[in-house]
Image (spheres, grey):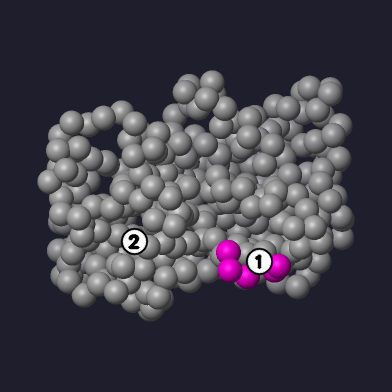
Amino acid sequence: MSDRFALIHNPRSRRNLKVDAQYMDMLAAMPDHVLHIPQTHDDLQRTLDALARDPVACLVVDGGDGTVCSVLSALNASAWPRDSWPLIVVLPSGNTNLIASDVGFASRGVKALDLVQDRLRAWRAGTAKVSVRRPLLVSCQQDKGRDLLGFFGGFGAFTHGVGIAHQPTILSHCSHDAAVLVTLLVAFAQMLSPTRRQSWLEGVEALISADGVTSLGRSHFMLLCTALHSLPHGVWPFWSKNGVAHKGVSYLDVAAMPERLFAACWHLLRGRVPEWLRRSSAYKSGNAEILTVCTNQPFVLDGEIIQPAENDCLTVKAGPEVSFLRV
């Protein structure tokens, strides 16, 4: 494998809509085997299949979380052997850039591509910063051919919050790295509305198990899970009883009609877990290799909506290792 890289550019990503003339000139000068602008998921899959036959050292993803999710899912579905997957570089260009905030480049455009080449040389010399993550691998048991890789997902109030927070009127006034903060704030703010409070607090029906241990309740206000090691602004609504962090899937399962919801929200959005929250039966958090979620409710993974079939179950497990090249 050479030091070549391939750039997968999503022109529809939010920050790419604002044209950078110098960057666009640089893209226009790139040969076809370097620059790829797939228009559909099928185009993207064909791109990754072709790259698997002629491997590069690094894939540069110019887009947001949804684009990274699509690229990694296509990579996973390709014939590219997992033990020789390329390094991944994430340029933060989307509506949400949680992945880039944890393992991505802080820069974009011409400067970022210059840095990529410099970091690849450092990688060959053994001096580059590389972060390894195991993305969430989400699949429906009745649809074996549609495995998705991503980094942040959930359902229940989280799904409702994503739908509201992604409205253009909110996105246009929200910094790109505040997605989870805004989504969770929106979700909890809906509790102030009497018309929505009761229906949201009653939760959604689901049977959830973590590494084979099934939760007692069938109604859930919200489930969150992630493969990231950090979130922007100090938000971290997860904890582990054994003190082991960032192993497998980090998850938070909030039961329907949870006690002291606003107090819990206040602490978790600041990355704090008081003792009463750890002891509460309404809030369960930990790390697992695999979550099984049996529900007919939509599950959101990095903006992608997964709709299970009736009587279907989702599995959310720690996927294959992915190496991210850092600045």
Q: Amino acid at mark 2?
A: Thr
Could you tell me if residue 131 is visible in this image?
no
| Crowding at mark 1 (Cα within 10 Å: few <14, some 14-19, many 20+) | few
Q: Is residue 23 above or below residue 175?
A: below
Amino acid found under the numbered disc labelled 1: Asp
- Please provide percent x and percent y for residue 115: 18, 50
Determine if the magenta segment contains residue 82: no
Element carrying mark 2: helix
Residue 235 x %, y % = 55, 42
Residue 47 tag number: 2
| Contact (Cβ within 8 Å) of mark 2 with mark 1 | no
Marking on residue 143: 1
Range drawn in magenta: 141-146
Q: Earlier in the sequence, mark 2 or mark 1?
A: 2
On screen, residue 325 above or below 301 = below
- What residue do we see at 19% from left, 38% from top? 23
Q: Is residue 103 left or right of residue 268?
A: left
Which of 243/156 is in front? 156
Left or right, 137 with respect to 118, comes to right
